[in-house]
Amino acid sequence: MAQKEVGIGLIGYAFMGKTHSNAYRQVARFFNPEVKPILRAICGRNEQNVKRAADQFGWESYETDYRRLLERKDIDIIDVSSPGNEHLPMAIAAAQAGKTVFCEKPLGNSFDEAKQMLDAVEKAKVVNMVCFNYRRVPAVALAKRMIENGDLGRIYHFRARYLQDWIADPNFPLVWRLQKEIAGSGTLGDIGAHILDLSAYLVGKLTEVCSMTETFVKQRPLQATSTGTEGLNAQASSEMGEVTVDDAAAFIGRFENGAMGVFEATRFAPGRRNFNTFEINGEKGSVAFNFERMNELEYFNAQDPTDRQGFRTINVNENDQPYSGIYWPAGHIIGYEHSFINTVYDLLQGHAQGKSPHPDFRDGAYNNGVLDTVVKASESRKWEAVPQV
Ligand SMILES: NC(=O)c1ccc[n+]([C@@H]2O[C@H](COP(=O)([O-])OP(=O)(O)OC[C@H]3O[C@@H](n4cnc5c(N)ncnc54)[C@H](O)[C@@H]3O)[C@@H](O)[C@H]2O)c1
């Protein structure tokens, strides 16, 4: 019997538009999903650019208004890869049109928005998923497996830092990520959201947080005319504008299971490009991960004989490890794009089986709830309770 086809409609054609397009094209070449993705249409507001993206990324057609994607009967999954302020209207309309909704992180620009989005997918009973792709890096999946096996025993600490440096130059322009009305928050929602999601995946939920945030550069040159595709290569104009989001955020939190969480996110760490790291300490050992060495997991086993104890580096491309055999023979490493291919595979399986893969919109709403609480705590200078979802 021929494999059932599923039509994809993707909104956004720049950074995430490219990674998601690649994932849909590659996924059936490595995995054997129950449904085969067909790249029906990509959407963007600028016709010339979206047409070029459709050709380059291999889409059958393009649209300049996302509502057209929702009307099309040949599209089953809507992928929201636009900036944060567009997530709510797009995801809610997609759910109401009965489509499976795959939304980039953070789910909403606030907890309130995320709850509305959760409500919409639950009312419409549609499959939903948030693109926290780092969950599906093999080394992270191995850490998850080890924690579930009890290899680390009781967890005491989750300690994470997500460091970048692309706006450390004060003359870098005021792109959308530095504007609250578009991005919701700054570094906190952009990269802090990722380490927070990893903590939810690996350790559990936070009950309360205490925090500080800072905006080091309060005025920046406005962006010169945007084509919507330049991203980190944006050019500055001579006019100045106000930065309305955080440049850095640091927070501590208490997990439901009694573990302590320490989190730091900044784009002002010169030399740190995509330094997405965590270390987890438990009663039987520790694991440590650094995305800049994404094929490796550091592991310390406190039960090793005392004369040979020490952190070992596990190359997570070997037999029996998560995702082994999907791509290349043992020892042949993979990259950033594979985290998206792995994520899209689970999305397709979820669509085929009518079951939302993790992290779903409820997980995304929890994430937004913590982000809002971090902002609240930095303003109140007090411990603040994380809202229930
Ligand atoms: N999972 C990850 O690791 C990761 C990494 C980067 C960005 N993101 C998230 O992905 C989303 C997009 O970020 P990006 O880096 O791709 O941004 P980007 O600026 O590179 O691209 C945004 C795209 O959305 C399009 N767009 C904006 N408004 C639109 C509208 N109304 N209709 C149609 N298209 C519209 C723009 O033209 C552009 O093509 C954000 O939510 C961001 O937080 C996730």
Image (cartoon, rainbow, N blue to C red):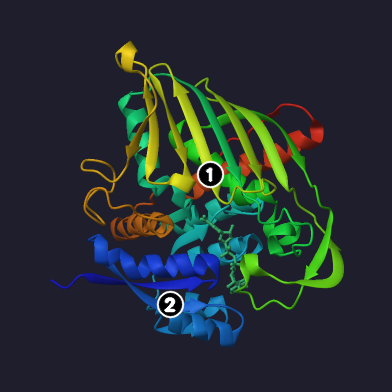
Q: Is residue 388 left or right of residue 311?
A: right
Estimate the x, y position of residue 332 in percent, counting from the top left: 28, 52
Question: In percent of the image, x 48 and y 52: which residue is there?
Answer: 122
Q: Nearer the viewer, mark 2 or mark 1?
A: 1
The answer to whether the beta carbon of the residue marked 1 is less than 8 Å from any atom of ligand 1 is no
Q: Is residue 208 above or below residue 228?
A: above
Residue at the left extreme? 1
Real-space Cα separation, disc 2 to disc 1, in angstroms:
27 Å
Estimate the x, y position of residue 328 in percent, counting from the top left: 24, 56
User: In this orientation, does residue 70 appear?
Assistant: yes
Residue at the top extreme? 306
Give, as a three-letter code, the residue at label 2.
Phe
Q: Quadrant of ligand 1?
A: bottom right
Residue situated in front as seen by the camera: 6 or 322: 322
Q: Quadrant of residue 64?
A: bottom right
Q: Is residue 1 above or below residue 31?
A: below
Question: In percent of the image, x 80 and y 32: which residue is there?
Answer: 380
Q: Is residue 140 above or below residue 126?
A: above
List the residue tagged with mark 2: 57
Q: Label 1 neighbourhood size at 10 Å, few (<14), some (14-19), many (20+)?
A: many
Estimate the x, y position of residue 322 in percent, counting from the top left: 29, 44
Q: Label 2 neighbourhood size at 10 Å, few (<14), some (14-19), many (20+)?
A: some
Give, as a three-letter code, the residue at label 1.
Asn
Mark number, residue 276: 1
Q: Earlier in the sequence, mark 2 or mark 1?
A: 2
